[in-house]
Image (cartoon, grey):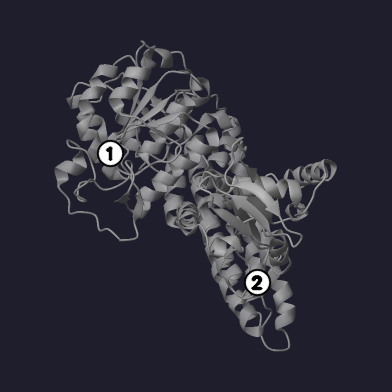
Amino acid sequence: MAFFTERSERMYIENNISFLTSNKYNWVAPASENLEPMFKGSEPNGDAYFEYGNGKVTVLKDQFDVNYKSRVNHKEIFIVFGIFSINEISKLYQTKNNDTLIIVIEPNLSVFNYVLHNKKLKIFSQPNIVLFADDQPENIITFLQPIIHEISYAKLLKKVNFHFTNYYRTNEKELIKQYIQLIRQTILGTVRAFGNDIVDSLIGLERNLKNLPFVLKAKDTTQMKDLHKGKPAIIVAAGPSLNKNFHLLKSVKDKAVIVAVDTIVEKLLDEGIVPDFVCSIERSERTYEFFYQESNIPKEVTLVAPAVLETRILEEFKGNILLPFRNEIAETLWLQRIMNLPTTSGIYMGSSCAHVAFGIAEHLGCSPLILVGQDLAFSDDSVITHAEGTIYHKLNRPPIAKSRHDIVEGYYGGTVTTTDTWRQFKVWFEKRIGEADLQVIDATEGGARIYFTDRISLQESIAKYCDKDIPHTSTLLSNIKPYPIDKNQLINNLQCEVEYCEELLNNIVIYFEKVESMKIDFKSFTKHHDELSVVHYIIKDVWKNDLLLHNLQSSILKYLWELNSREQIISKENVQTEKEEQIKLLGVMSRTIYEVQRHIKAALDELNKE
């Protein structure tokens, strides 16, 4: 048995804590007092023995996989299971590409605790290696978020590979399967979020700029921060599970803030339930025609939506209008900058009207946030997608095509069938709840399980949390003033953006002509390889402008994913491919920047007319 003195163990843990705290991305969960399995002893060769409560003894070894081949020519995210094999991890690190990110996952806190006290973790003070040590698999969702949204790692998302150290090569297969599914869902949701179509983004910019007059008059979201602090909010979505509990919502009048998605508001009003807020996000004409045209939404209901909404909705809506800026979106940072507004003017609103509803309730300081009708999955008969009384239910459309791969954990356990879009919505909820440490109750009583929520029935939730009168929202909003936007300063800022676009366009054209004229042959391909690196400086110039980043992010990432997925060898073929990829990227960049500039000029013309 190996023997460690108290002093040597203390030295190990002090050094290891220093190594682990050097990287902001490392995640180590607090260990409970009664960890299982318990450490029983170790051998001089490094093997360690752990015993479970049922008497089963597990031997952990630090042995390198003889079948492993160097990954030095591959840029990727490399996920490694098991921290015990620290020598194996070090060898993996030595044979990876410099840009590759290694993520080490240790699901067993007892093993991590042993390693922390008895092995050197200096490898974690090196760049591009991070640790996740936690016995709650769903926490991997929150852990991954800041990493995969960092550009140096986001560019690797199209190539994710897994490696299993000695113990995990033969054990814990179901647990590993759960981790891989959670990682896959999180990354897929992120890739989709990055992948907005350029035309779609430009339409959004055009609508934001067209609706500037409404933004200038809208209530200041910053002044609404924590307006309902500590008060319960019921966020009403339109999933089919709502049918069983609709009648309960009548009992919460003046006892909770009711935030409804646009899809369900007509049904609520028909039942005599007047929500505090109605929330929209889609900018299509259908949103206006389905939910607002000739609607009977009373004046005391407040509209919450991003400024991309169909202009007719803003013109005709009777009540207060909130046009909060959209956190997590680069375009929002640009809008806030040119209007000189603080980041508190934004809310988290994801990509669905239910996310908008959740975001405004969070911004108001409501707690707990109670979700109903948030199925994010097909009903039990695998056909119905919305509650009764909604426009989609009335249209009686054909069932949505399903894939056998669209399977997630159900509210009551087991599995349910979902879609890629609904899965993305689910991941957003989990991300936001986890990173903000919110108290959220899922009272949907059906559909997909949303991690980090307490599953309590709506009846129990109302009885426990909705027992006191709260101030009426429309009364509180009467004291909120419009955004403090200086119109003249806004015009000056927009003019500066026009000039920035013009300078960048000129630089792109000059470089484009140089790339297009390159003749790649066996004598010159090495020289041209070096010359083609200039594109990364242009990408940096685009990346530091939030508006251009928002519109070009998907194209730049697709280019980087293509570049990084190729084997990292300098050859004539690879240099020729790189030239062709850059020509495509530069063409998209120049056209997009021209369109952005054109939309800004049009907005300037309108502002100068007023």
Q: Is residue 610 left or right of residue 573?
A: left
Q: Where does residue 454 sit, x and y in percent of width and height?
A: 41, 32
Q: Where does residue 282 sit, x and y in percent of width and height?
A: 35, 43
Q: What element carries label 2?
A: loop
Q: Residue 442 falls in which quadrant of the image?
A: top left
Amino acid carrying label 2: it is Arg
Residue positioned most to the right: 7
Amino acid carrying label 1: it is Tyr
Front residue of 219/522: it is 522
Q: Residue at x 64, y 79 (%)?
A: 575
| Residue assigned mark 1 | 288
The residues bearing labels 2 and 1 have C-alpha atoms spaced at a distance of 53 Å
**Marking on residue 448:** none
Front residue of 502/51: it is 51
Q: Where does residue 2 sit, x and y in percent of width and height?
A: 77, 54
Residue 358 shows in the view: yes
Q: In this view, does 349 lie to the left or right of 36?
A: left
Q: Residue at x 20, y 54 (%)?
A: 399
